[in-house]
Amino acid sequence: MNVFIVHAHPEPQSFNGALTRHAQQVLQAEGHQVQVSDLYAMGWNPVSDRRNFTTVANPDLYKQQAEEAHAVANHGFAPDVQAEMDKVSTCDVLIFQFPLWWFSMPAILKGWVDRVLASGFAYGGGRWHDRGVFRGKRAMLSLTTGGGETYFSPEGLSGDILMQLYPINSGVLRFCGFDVLPPHISFAAARVSAEQRAAYLESYAQRLRTLATTQPIAYPSLAEFDETFRRRVTG
């Protein structure tokens, strides 16, 4: 498979860095191709604006989706954006590697999503969820947290981490058609022992070796959602 890792951490010696390096080694040993976009090392610009494009649909009023549709039709994305689009288009598996900051992605990774997963390219025209552009591809989050696992449990102070990740898993990845795998979470990575970090690396290796066979998270299909909505409306 062709695995594309979007890595979002400013420190190469961080545990996030160790996870990405380990992923490269494990996946290549399994015979897979690996591409990595290290956003901080690339100097990725997270701000989504007219710099996304080499074309202009309306010079007087900026509407992002209108500019995206125009760029799709006229090959008008900026080179940095187009390069990332090409990586997404050719990958079989997309992995986001990041630290959980303020219960979400770092801004640089959110900016990657804003700029790269453009309307007309990643979704649109009825292409979303199980009818999405990237149906047949897989995606997974690999992340670290500051707090321990109990802190992010359903009864913990911060609540269920799977609910916190829902906007990314469902609202970004599944929305674009990916089959979303359960996340790999390294809890309190900076605070646990070296032995626990080694265990995290080994558990991640096992997840990576089973990318093709791991059961995705179950989300309702559009047909199921439509039927549920119809029943609620009609009583």
Image (cartoon, rainbow, N blue to C red):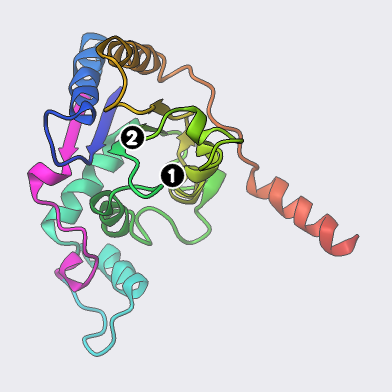
Report helix, strand or loop for mark 1.
helix
The residues tagged by marks 2 and 1 sit, at their Cα atoms, a distance apart of 9 Å
- The structure residue drawn at horizontal position 37% and vertical position 50%, both measured from the top left corner, is 102
> Which picture quadrant has residue 86?
top left
Report helix, strand or loop for mark 2.
strand
Number of residues whose C-alpha sits closer than 10 Å to that of mark 1, classed few (under 14), some (14–19) or many (20 or more):
many
Is residue 42 within the magenta segment? yes
Q: Is the residue 111 above or below the residue 199 in the image?
A: below
Query: Disc 2 residue type?
Result: Leu
Query: Disc 1 residue type?
Result: Leu
- Position in image of residue 203 (x %, y %): 37, 13
Q: Is residue 158 left or right of residue 142?
A: right
Tag 1 residue: 173
> Which picture quadrant has residue 45?
bottom left
- The structure residue drawn at horizontal position 21% and vertical position 18%, both measured from the top left corner, is 22
- Position in image of residue 134 (x %, y %): 42, 42
**Do the numbered discs 2 and 1 sit on residues whose CB atoms are within 8 Å?**
yes
Of residues 213 and 153, which is closer to you in this image? 153
Number of residues whose C-alpha sits closer than 10 Å to that of mark 2, classed few (under 14), some (14–19) or many (20 or more):
many
Tag 2 residue: 94
